[in-house]
Structures are given as C-alpha cells and as structure tokens.
C-alpha cells in the first residue's frame, strides 16, 4: 500500500514543495535529488517556518565575531580569546531511544563548537519530562541522564549545569536541549565556507552507515530498493571515543592551518555539509559517491548522501596540504578520504564511477563514463531553501481550563488561615522541580579540564580561564509554565532569568543562544505561540542589550493528544573579569544584613506554588518590566564590582521563600527576617514575579548598597540578618494566615523552619520522586502540600 | 632543577589537561608521552592520567595495558622510577598488574562524580611525602568503575605491608567502609589508592590533579602531585626514591 504514496509525500514534502523543487531545477527531480531536498528542506535544516521570525532577532554586538548562520556563535572576550557557544535540541531521537538520543545530542553540539576552532570546555543540558512517577518517564530520565553522562564523561568535557523540569505537557514528548561552550584563540576561528575552486573536499572521522536516515525515515518502506528489513534505518549511535579523537585531530588541523574550512556532519549528513559549505563560499562541489568510506556494503546512493552517522567532519583542503592532513588523521587513528572537489560552478553534483570504483580522476575531473546521479544548485538546498509564511492565530481561550475537581478560587487566597507557611515551603523545596538535582548531576563529570569553579547545583556555572584572571559564567533557563499562558511573557522571562543568573555572580552577560521548542507550525495557534515567543525573545534581548548569536528551532513537539508547553530554552554566557570577585548564592556569614531588591507584583499563575496547590489560577502570571530588569541587573553587577555583596540569589521558581531557603541550605546557616506581605502572603512568599534579588551584605555595607539601588531606581527592603539554625520569616501586614492574627497581633504569622529540615526536604525530593531511593527512609518534604485545604 | 614528568597519552585520555596543569602548579615540566612510542623522553617520573583509554570498551584499562608505551612504563617501574596512575590510570596499572587489586563497577552501578575526602594512611611514601598532615584531603572523584577489590588475604597483606596509601573518609574523619556515606563506590576497607610492594608505583581513583588550586574549590591534592614531582627529581638525581624497597621486577 505504501507504493501508492507519491515519493515526495513519503519523504515528507508537500505538493507545493515539489513544485518549488521543479522550479529550482527547471525540471523533474530524480529520486536522489528529491531525497536531498527532503532532508535539507526539513524544518531542522531550512528553518522554513521560523526563518521570517528569526530575522527579527537582534544579532549585532561589538564583540560578536561569528553569529547566526555559523555553526556556533563566537564572541570575543579579550586577551585574544573568544568563546563559542550554541544550544541545540535532540528531542525526537531521545523520545525513541533515550540513551543514544541524548548521547548523540551531546556529540552533535560539541562538533558545532570545535568545528569553529574552539576546544569544548563545558556542556549544559536542559531536560524536560512528564510525570516523574510514571514508569515511562523514569525510563526516559534514566536513559537520557546516562546518555548525557556516558558521552560527556568519556569525551572529557565537563557537564556543569542545565535544568531538569517535570511537567505533564512533556509526557509524550520529552525535551533534550544541550548547550556546549568552547574556548578559542581568535586566530583559530574557522568558518564553514568552501572557498577556492580546485580545493579538496575531505571527509574524516567515522565511516558512513545506515544509521539515522533521519528526516527521511519513511524511505525504507517506500519505493526505494527492496523490502529487506536489514535496510531499516536506526537511531544514530554515538561513539564518544571517536569524538574525542575527532576533537584532537580537528584542533590540530586548524592550529597548523592545514585546512581552509571545516564543517561537522549532523542532520542531513553529507548532503548538508557539502551544500551549506558550498553555498557560503559561493561555490559548488563535485562529490564522488564511491570515495565515501562505508561501514557496510550495499548502501543506496540516497542512504550515503543523507545518512546521519555520527562523528564525521568535512574539511576543505588545498591539494598541497592533503598529505599533512592525512598524516594528522592517521596519527589520531581516524579514517580520512578525498570525496570531492570544490568547483566554481555553484552546483552540488553527485557522481559515481562507471564501475562504482571512483568518479573523479587525479585531476579532480570526472573520469570517462562517470555517471551524474544528482545536480542541484547549492543555494537551492541552503540559503534559498523554501520559506513558508505560516498562518498565525491567537487561541480564543488563552487560559488553561481548571483540571477536573480542582478549585476555581484564585490561588492568591492560599495559604489558608491556619496553614503553616513553613510546611508549604518544605513541600515546595522537596518537590520534583525545586529539590536538589544532585542525584542527576553526580552522574556527570563536572570537573574534568580543571576549570570548574562552580559546577552544577547552585545557580550559574563558573569556569575559570587558565592563564588569565577571567572566568566564564553560563546558564540555561526556560520558563514554560508561563509560556503556556502567555508565550511572549514566557520567552521574555526566560531571557531575563538567564541573564539575571549570570549577572548575580557579577558577570556581564555576553550573548544569547536559544533553542525554541514549539508545536506543529501548520497549526495557526501553535505558530502564533512560536511567533509570540520569538517576539518576547527579541524584546528582552534588545532591552538587556544582548545579541542572539545562534540557536536551533525544534517544531512538531507534539504527541497524540498533547502538545508541549511552548518552551524557549535560553543559554547565556557571561564574562567575569576577575574570578576572585565572583559572588555565589549561599549565605556566607552570620549577622549579615539581608536585603530584598525589587518588589513583588501580584499573580500566581504559572508558579510552582500553583502547581503544587493543584489549583488552576484565574489570575494572570506576573508580567515583566524589561527596563526595570535591565536596571536591576546593572545594579547588582555594579554592587558586586564595588565589593558590597556577600551573596546573592534571584527570586524565581518557588518564589522568595524558596530563594531564601536555598541560601540558608547552601550556606549552612539560618536567618531571622521580617517581610511585609500586604494582603497576600502567598504572593509575597511564593509568587514568582521577576526582577527581584535577595542580597546578603555586611552590615556596614548595607547603607551603601541601598543608596546604590536607589541610584538605579531599584526599591529595597531590609529583611533582617543571617545566623542561627532556623529560617524565620515574620510576616507583617493585613494578610491573615494564622492564629497570631486572631490574637490581635499585626504580625499575621511567622514562617519558621530548621535549616536541617529544609536541607532534608531539598536533598531527598528528586530521588524520591524518581524512585531512586527507599521511600521509607524519611518523612519531611513530599510532592503534595501537606494538609492543604482551599478556603471557601 | 625542574623535574620532567611524563603524562602518558592514550587515545581517549582526557584528564591530561588537568594533569599538565597540576604538574606546572607543582613546579614540574610536563612531557606528553604518546601511546605508540616506547621512548620516555628522559622523564624521571610518570603520571598516567584519567580518561577512557581506547574508549574503555571492553573493560576499563584492559586494552591500554598492551600499548607500546606501557611496555616502557613497566620497564621504568622495574628500575624503581616513580609512577602514579589516577582514575583510568589506576585502572590501567591494575590491569597491567603493576599495582595489586582490581577496580570493579561502582556498587551503585552509576557513574559517580562528587567531592570526596581521602585520608593518607602514611606520609612517608613517594606519593604522600609532601602531604603536610594526616587529615582528610578534599578532591573530586569521577568514575564508573572505581570499587577497589582484592581478596581478604591480599587486603590483609597490603595493610601489613603499608601498601594502602589512601582511604575514603566520612564527614567525621573516620575511614569510610563500603557502605558508609564517604565511600563513593563501595571500595573494600575504604581503599582509595594503593602502591606496589616496591612502593614506587601507585594508583588512586580520586583526582588530586583537579584539586590543586583554591579557585577550583580545593588545593588539597597538591601535596600528592608535589610528592610525585619531588620523587621524580630525587630519582633523576640519585637513581632511586626514598621510601621504596629494592624493586623486584616492578610487579607487586
């Protein structure tokens, strides 16, 4: 029955796309050409739905030396050094085969970075899954975590940060986004541009096999060849050992100036690497199909051309350097082969010899009897690929419907009278999304290369730069719960939070890489969410003065019956001029002043508090004033530079109470505080309105800190002092939560929890949620609000 | 006189960067030794770094022991030269029978990366002589196969012999047995590192070479690296290292 499906449909192209292919070629495409178009015109390679939106992003910056369109963004950091970084998704492979999906996700993004001439120095992984208690989720988490670790640990690049978030919207479609960071001397910068007709096209690394016949996975059951089940495509398989050799060989090739350019092979394999490099160089290529090293016999031409076998690179090499290139590859035990020539004529031409034994002669010209299997103008596959102007429509109903049986009241009324806010805090700290991620990140080598100053666990990662006083600061953040309610706001908050996490160490954010995880762009509501997300990303980047240097778009993140919450994952790298000045998020001493900078705004929708309460908030999520956010971040950077700050944490998931609890747990000391809560203790304690920081300062520095805040237009509130074994927050205001108010006191109630209990809840939440520890072991914390009943 | 200390580079070694950094911090000149060469380039000490030599595909360290460079390392060890294997380097030395015992999969069956504390058993060995006092030293571990194993009789002999050099420590400073919180992998008797009978070849699972600067969270590992460097300098000058016994062919 599959034979009745037209080939272009089987390959995932629609009729208008076939017409566009005909127009580009001026004739009917043959089957191989159609296969090449199908992979290059996939969303992943062509950005055909998102490209018009992405053009609106700010990409300029005085220190940007390579940006959007390159394999990774590169930003100068002084001293002749630059940082290369990029984030990319591997969602769908990870949903099918979590270990290899995640492992090859790490491998792919590392290649993007070292192909630019940078040594990879860090990986961050942002992971999103469904219900942690579901067996399928546990299978995926376990496989993905082992895959990230299995690859990163072996290849010798530390995994220094990331995220792990659980939300029902990812139940059928987990997200695996991996960011890589590399460091390079600016002279090493290499672009993937096939310059110089007559130069050699060299393929090096692993041999080409049948694995990962990606976007065209339907091929095997279509009209190509026979129905031999051995020809079924498989998920790509990663070999971190081969990648480690590839890193060393590639960096040696670049350092010794043996290559004109380098591109890694990822999605769409050789097709992508040849047409993109040719397109950037304004050239074309003759590709000798017979010269491509194979892992197995009997591969069809289309399989060779679109295979996504891992750990392969393409280099453009001047003929005189080929012997030296080959020597380097041989020494590292890597196969290498000349598979083609750069041509002035801008066509990618795939050839085979008369007996399948070589199509190009020593002079680089086709031998007599060579057969042309495909001829496509390089731009048609790359920069001039088809673009769609998708229909966008805001959903009629923007708010979530309440879950069956859930309370309809605004969550702002919580906690109810008599509810102990300390118990709520313990429940939040022990919840799957807010508890310690240690059980996961202890499976990642976070120290190798001896640069890790602050690894995973406590906010942004800090990596010193050897031979300088500088450090890089890196983080990933994505706010999907708010994005589900308001995709503009979700994206803007994600950028703001990522930048804030960098700024509160004292570092200056340098630039943004983004991974846009959205739904089916042919659905107008899903495309609207993407468009709003890009608009929020652009607005926040402009407001914070941050260039977008690259990223990746992952669409069609939908499983039957569910679409993911729109998830813009933001990666930011910052620069700290003197690592000795860095500030961490743990309380450092007793008797310090504790200040809150910024003011809470109403709204609990999209918060972890609302999630745990099981209530569907009827209010709006708190919005963001981007100008205020920019001033807040400038303030904290200046305060740190002046030495006024002992420790600092931003208010984000879980709200102020969770931020304070983290500072206590990480610092091993409590605090005695008093907080004005207005008419809503829940908003004050657990609301997640942005642009707020908790700052610890020596008492003698507090006046200067408050003065500096005023100078930046930031309000501050002196909350109290650090010290003691408990976190105590007296609540002041008319918001009534407990018995004290009934005694006529203006103090509504107090939150009071021993730091040891906070630590216990925080330590055990995740392993318990995932079933990684004996449930009987302890009592504190948990996944539900203890004894919570809703008022009314 | 700057000691020249070789760093053995297998395909898949990845803590060579850390090792070179640590040797420089400790005042030595690092010399990278390629796995296909038997030329030790005149070094007077050898550090086998962590990583996944040859991908560790069969079993950690098992292929590396057959490499040309390991023949040269074994000869060097047999002449009494100081050799320190860290993490994968320890696994390679154990597979090559240059140090006693074996390293099994971690008891928890997962890769473990965390800060641990190790307690030196003695301060008069070639690899602990520069450690100031017998207190827990903080440094990271990062391995999947680090559970130290030998039969009971061998363990007794190693202890009697002074061949146990480091043990994992609990937060209270006591030795961390296989089930204790301070023991990351279930190593028997808390053993984190051992040396051969002659005392000139040692291996340990934790990473002193990644804990040599306060900015990295700990410099407690520097004493161990400096011990190797001092022993290497002594070997270069005198042809032997204090605290070692007459080598008996380098084997334990």
Image: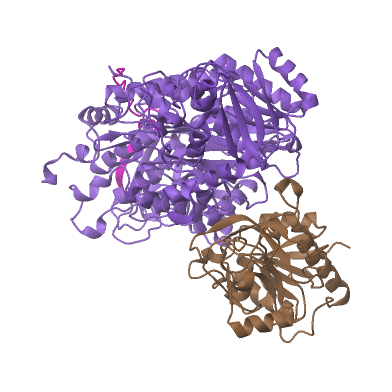
Q: Is residue A378 magenta?
A: yes
On the question of residue A665 being in view, the answer is: yes
Q: Can you tell which chain is drawn purple?
A: A
Q: Is residue A34 left or right of residue A677?
A: left
Residue drawn where x is 77% and y is 79% of the image: B80
Q: Read off the magenta span.
A: A367-395
Question: For residue A276: magenta?
Answer: no
Q: Position of residue B26 (x, y in %)?
A: 80, 57
- Residue nearer the viewer, A298 or B94: B94
Q: Colour of chain B?
A: brown
In the image: residue B170, left or right of residue A5: right
On the image, the x and y values in percent for residue A168 come to 34, 37
**Mostly what secondary structure, the magenta segment?**
loop
The location of residue A171, given as percent across then percent down, is: 33, 41
Q: Nearer the viewer, residue A178 or A293?
A: A178
Residue A580, located in which quarter of the rendered image?
top right
Q: Which is more toward the observer, A743 or B229?
A: A743
**Residue A71 visible at all:** no
């Amino acid at each position: 029955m599959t034979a009745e499906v037209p080939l272009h449909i089987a390959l995932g192209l629609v009729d208008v796309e076939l017409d566009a292919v005909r127009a580009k070629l001026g004739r009917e495409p043959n089957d191989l050409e159609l296969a090449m178009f199908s992979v290059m015109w996939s969303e992943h390679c062509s950005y055909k739905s998102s490209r018009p939106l992405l053009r609106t992003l700010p990409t300029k910056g005085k220190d940007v030396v390579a940006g959007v369109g390159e394999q990774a963004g590169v930003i100068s950091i002084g001293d002749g050094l630059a940082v290369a970084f990029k984030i990319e998704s591997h969602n769908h492979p990870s949903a099918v085969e979590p270990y290899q999906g995640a492992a090859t996700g790490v491998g792919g993004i590392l290649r993007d970075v070292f192909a630019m001439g940078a040594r990879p120095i860090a990986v961050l992984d942002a992971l999103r899954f469904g219900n942690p208690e579901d067996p399928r989720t546990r299978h995926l988490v376990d496989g993905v975590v082992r895959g990230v670790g299995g690859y990163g640990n072996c290849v010798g690049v530390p995994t220094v940060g990331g995220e792990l978030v659980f939300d029902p919207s990812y139940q059928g479609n987990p997200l695996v986004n991996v960011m890589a960071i590399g460091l390079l001397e600016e002279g090493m910068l290499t672009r993937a541009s096939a310059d110089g007709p007559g130069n050699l096209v060299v393929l090096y690394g692993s041999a080409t096999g049948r694995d990962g016949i990606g976007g065209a996975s339907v091929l095997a059951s279509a009209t190509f060849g026979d129905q031999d089940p051995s020809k079924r495509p498989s998920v790509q398989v990663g070999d971190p050992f081969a990648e480690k050799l590839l890193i060393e060989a590639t960096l040696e090739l670049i350092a010794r100036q043996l290559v004109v350019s380098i591109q890694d092979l990822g999605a769409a394999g050789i097709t992508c690497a040849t047409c993109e490099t040719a397109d950037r160089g304004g050239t074309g290529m003759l590709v000798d199909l017979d010269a491509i090293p194979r892992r197995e016999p009997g591969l069809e031409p289309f399989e060779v051309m679109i295979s996504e076998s891992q750990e392969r690179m393409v280099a453009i090499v001047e003929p005189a350097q080929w012997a030296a290139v080959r020597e380097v590859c041989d020494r590292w035990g890597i196969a290498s082969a000349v598979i083609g020539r750069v041509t002035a004529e801008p066509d990618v031409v795939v050839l085979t010899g008369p007996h399948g034994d070589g199509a190009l002669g020593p002079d680089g010209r086709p031998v007599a009897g060579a057969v042309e299997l495909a001829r496509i103008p390089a731009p048609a596959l790359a920069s001039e690929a088809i673009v769609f102007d998708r229909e966008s429509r805001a959903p009629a109903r923007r708010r979530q419907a309440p879950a069956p049986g859930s309370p309809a009241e605004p969550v702002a009324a919580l906690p109810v009278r008599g509810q102990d806010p300390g118990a709520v805090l313990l429940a939040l700290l022990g919840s799957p999304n807010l508890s310690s991620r240690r059980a996961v990140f202890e499976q990642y080598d976070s120290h190798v290369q001896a640069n890790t100053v602050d690894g995973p666990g406590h906010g942004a990662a800090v990596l010193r730069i050897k031979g300088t006083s500088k450090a890089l600061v890196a983080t990933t953040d994505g706010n999907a719960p708010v994005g589900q309610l308001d995709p503009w706001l979700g994206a803007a908050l994600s950028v703001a939070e990522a930048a804030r996490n960098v700024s509160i160490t004292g570092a200056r954010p340098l630039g943004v890489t983004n991974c846009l995880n959205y739904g089916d762009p042919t659905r107008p509501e899903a495309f609207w969410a993407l468009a709003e997300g890009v608009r929020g990303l652009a607005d926040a980047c402009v407001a914070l003065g941050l260039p977008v240097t690259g990223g990746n778009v992952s669409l069609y993140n939908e499983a039957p019956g569910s679409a993911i919450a729109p998830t813009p994952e933001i990666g930011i790298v910052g620069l700290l001029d003197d690592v000795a000045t860095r500030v961490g998020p743990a309380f450092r001493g007793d008797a310090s002043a504790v200040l809150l900078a910024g003011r809470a705004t109403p709204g609990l929708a999209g918060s972890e508090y609302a999630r745990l309460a099981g209530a569907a908030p009827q209010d709006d999520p708190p919005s963001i004033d981007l100008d205020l956010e920019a001033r807040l971040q400038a303030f904290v950077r200046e305060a740190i530079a002046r030495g006024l700050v002992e420790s600092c944490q931003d208010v984000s998931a879980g709200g102020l109470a969770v931020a304070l609890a983290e500072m206590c747990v990480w610092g091993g000391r409590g605090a005695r505080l008093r907080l004005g809560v207005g008419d809503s203790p829940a908003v004050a304690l657990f609301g997640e309105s942005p642009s707020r920081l908790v700052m610890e300062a020596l008492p003698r520095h507090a006046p200067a800190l408050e003065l500096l805040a005023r100078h930046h237009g930031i309000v501050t509130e002196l909350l109290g002092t650090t010290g003691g074994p408990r976190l105590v927050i007296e609540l002041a205001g008319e918001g009534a939560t407990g018995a004290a108010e009934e005694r006529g006191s203006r103090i509504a109630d107090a939150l009071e929890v021993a730091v040891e209990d906070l630590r216990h809840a925080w330590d055990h939440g995740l392993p318990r949620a995932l079933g990684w520890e004996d449930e009987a072991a302890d009592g504190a914390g948990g996944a539900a609000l203890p004894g919570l009943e809703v008022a009314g | 006189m700057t000691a020249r200390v070789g760093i053995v580079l297998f395909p898949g070694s990845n803590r060579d960067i850390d090792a070179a950094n640590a040797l420089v911090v400790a005042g030595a000149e690092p010399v990278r030794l390629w796995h296909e060469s038997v030329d030790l380039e005149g070094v007077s000490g050898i550090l086998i770094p962590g990583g996944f030599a040859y991908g560790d595909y069969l079993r950690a360290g098992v292929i590396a022991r057959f490499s040309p460079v390991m023949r040269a390392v074994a000869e060097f060890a047999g002449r009494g030269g100081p050799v320190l294997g860290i993490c994968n380097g320890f696994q390679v030395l154990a597979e090559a029978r240059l140090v006693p015992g074996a390293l099994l999969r971690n008891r928890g069956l997962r890769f473990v990366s965390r800060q641990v504390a190790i307690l030196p058993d003695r301060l008069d060995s070639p690899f602990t002589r520069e450690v100031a006092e017998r207190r827990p030293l903080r440094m990271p571990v990062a391995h999947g196969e680090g559970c130290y194993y030998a039969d009971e009789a061998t363990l007794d002999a190693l202890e009697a012999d002074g061949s146990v050099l480091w043990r994992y420590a609990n937060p209270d400073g006591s030795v961390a047995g296989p089930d204790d919180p301070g023991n990351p992998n279930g190593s028997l008797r808390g053993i984190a590192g051992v040396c051969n009978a002659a005392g000139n070849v040692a291996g340990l699972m934790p990473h002193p070479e990644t804990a040599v600067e306060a900015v990295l969270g700990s410099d407690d590992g520097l004493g161990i690296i400096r011990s190797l460097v001092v022993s290497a300098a002594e070997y270069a000058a005198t042809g032997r290292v204090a605290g070692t016994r007459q080598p008996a062919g380098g084997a334990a």
